[in-house]
Amino acid sequence: MTMMPPGSPVPFPRASEPDRVSFDRAELGAILSVYGRMVSAGEWRDYGISALPDLAVFAVFRRTAENPLYRIEKRPKLRNRQGMYAVVGENGMILRRGHDLAAVLKVLEKKLIRPIE
């Protein structure tokens, strides 16, 4: 053990925080682009973001107090298998999964296409 000079600060041991999965700037840009279009169409009104040790979630809501309509999930452990991005519906069913976030988000874009009355 090394001797510290008198009067020097003693470092506190850091609590080891588990690494958290999160969306990077490009991923959030793609997600917020779809979110903005859906808000302007009146379909969505609120969102929530969670960064957990094994996944990141972007949840979209029709109203604030409801269960999320869709969850956009990022699971890096599935990167080499089915793809780390997924869109999950309100009932928990996976609507689309893949390696490319833009391709996965296209399942939500189809909700904007409606016939003109």
Image (cartoon, rainbow, N blue to C red):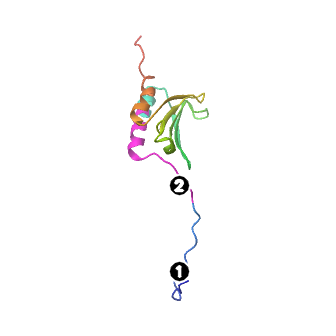
Residue 66 is one of the magenta-drawn residues: no
Residue 112 placement: quadrant: top left
* Mark 1 burial class by Cα count in 10 Å: few <14, some 14-19, many 20+: few
Three-letter residue code for mark 2: Asp
State the image coordinates of residue 85 (x, y, percent, origin top left). Answer: 47, 37
Q: Nearer the viewer, mark 1 or mark 2?
A: 2
In this view of the protein, which residue sits in the foreground, 108 or 21?
Answer: 21
Above or below — where is 107 with respect to 83?
above
Q: Position of residue 57 (x, y in %)?
A: 53, 41
Q: Secondary structure at mark 1?
A: loop
Q: Which residue is mark 2?
A: 19
Question: Which residue is depicted at the point 45% across and 30% down?
Answer: 39
Horizontal relation, residue 49 to residue 114: left or right:
right
* 60 or 1, nearer to the observer: 1
Residue 47 in the image: x percent, y percent? 52, 37
Local SS, label 2:
loop
Q: Quadrant of the N terminus?
A: bottom right
Position of the C terminus, as image quadrant, is: top left
Contact check, label 1 and label 2, Cβ < 8 Å: no
Structural crowding at the residue carrying mark 2, measured as other residues with C-alpha within 10 Å and reported as few (<14), some (14–19) or many (≥20): few
Q: Which residue is mark 1?
A: 9
Amino acid type at circle 1 is Pro
Q: Is residue 35 above or below residue 3?
A: above
**Nearer-N-terminus badge (1/2):** 1
In the depicted structure, whether residue 17 falls above or below residue 92: below
Magenta stretch in the rendered image:
17-34
Residue 108 marker: none
